[in-house]
Amino acid sequence: MENFKERLKAIEEETAHLNIANTVRHLCARFPEKVCFSTSFGKEDQALSHIIFNERLPVKTFTLDTGRLFQETYDVMDETRERYGKQIDIYFPDQDKVEAMVNKKGPNSFYRSVENRKECCHIRKVEPLQRALKGNIIWITGLMGDQSEFRKQLPTFEYDANFKVIKYNPLINWQRDYLENFIEEHQIPVNKLHEKGFVSIGCKPCTRAIKPGEDYRAGRWWWEESKKECGLHLTRTNNS
């Protein structure tokens, strides 16, 4: 981890006055073929996809297909691929592990306990992410501070001890209005579910539209009272 701490400090200093595109360009030059971006095709990720693809930045872009996504998510995935003509790698969960879980506990086990839900998230999302991040040094995310109290505390750069990478959160200080204006200005494809009150979109059985005044993450695992995270973004260990 010490090596990552030293890299983290150097990166923060080197990119302090750069915009997002130039920061990513610098990271790609500093760590050739070791910079990746994960997208779930929400508005935040779509804004970053536009910057990366429009600037022709050599970033490996990938998504996680859990096997339980909305059709609207596949639609915007297709639209994005066609609009920019760029490769988006798709990572699926391990077939044997999914079959074992569903055969043992049924297709809706995640509704019955937090433990079951976390097991499903781990198999369908965390393990594929581990494979996607393997060999990379920089992981670009679309996290924004207004998405949750936990995410509000995140810095622009952090060391992720779970996945042993440096995370770059370029939108962490963006305001929601700025994001909306950026998308409108550049006519960026967005998921049609956003028009129906879905703000944070994940797996179909685990996502609902939010009601006026509800928290941004209220529609995720809506039957639980626990922290609305699936295991992809959990720790803050970069400055410890």
Image (tube, grey):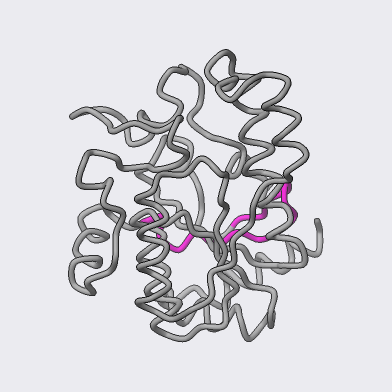
- Total numbered labels placed on residues in the image: 0
Most foreground residue, 6 or 40:
40
Q: Which stretch is magenta?
A: 158-173
Residue 218 x, y percent position in the rendering: 36, 28
Q: Residue at x 61, y 55 (%)?
A: 158
The quarter of the image holding the N terminus is bottom right
Q: Residue at x 56, y 60 (%)?
A: 157
Horizontal placement of 43 versus 154: left or right?
A: left
Q: Residue at x 69, y 74 (%)?
A: 34
Residue 205 x, y percent position in the rendering: 45, 30
Horizontal placement of 171 versus 175: left or right?
A: right
Residue 170 shown in magenta: yes
Query: Which quarter of the figure has residue 222?
Result: top left
Residue 157 shown in magenta: no
Q: Residue at x 26, y 47 (%)?
A: 194
Most foreground residue, 34 or 71:
71
The quarter of the image holding the C terminus is top right
Furthest residue toward right = 2
Vertical order, 132 against 10 (above or below): above
Residue 215 x, y percent position in the rendering: 31, 31
Vertical order, 6 against 129 (above or below): below
Query: Which quarter of the figure has residue 14?
Result: bottom right
Residue 144 x, y percent position in the rendering: 40, 51
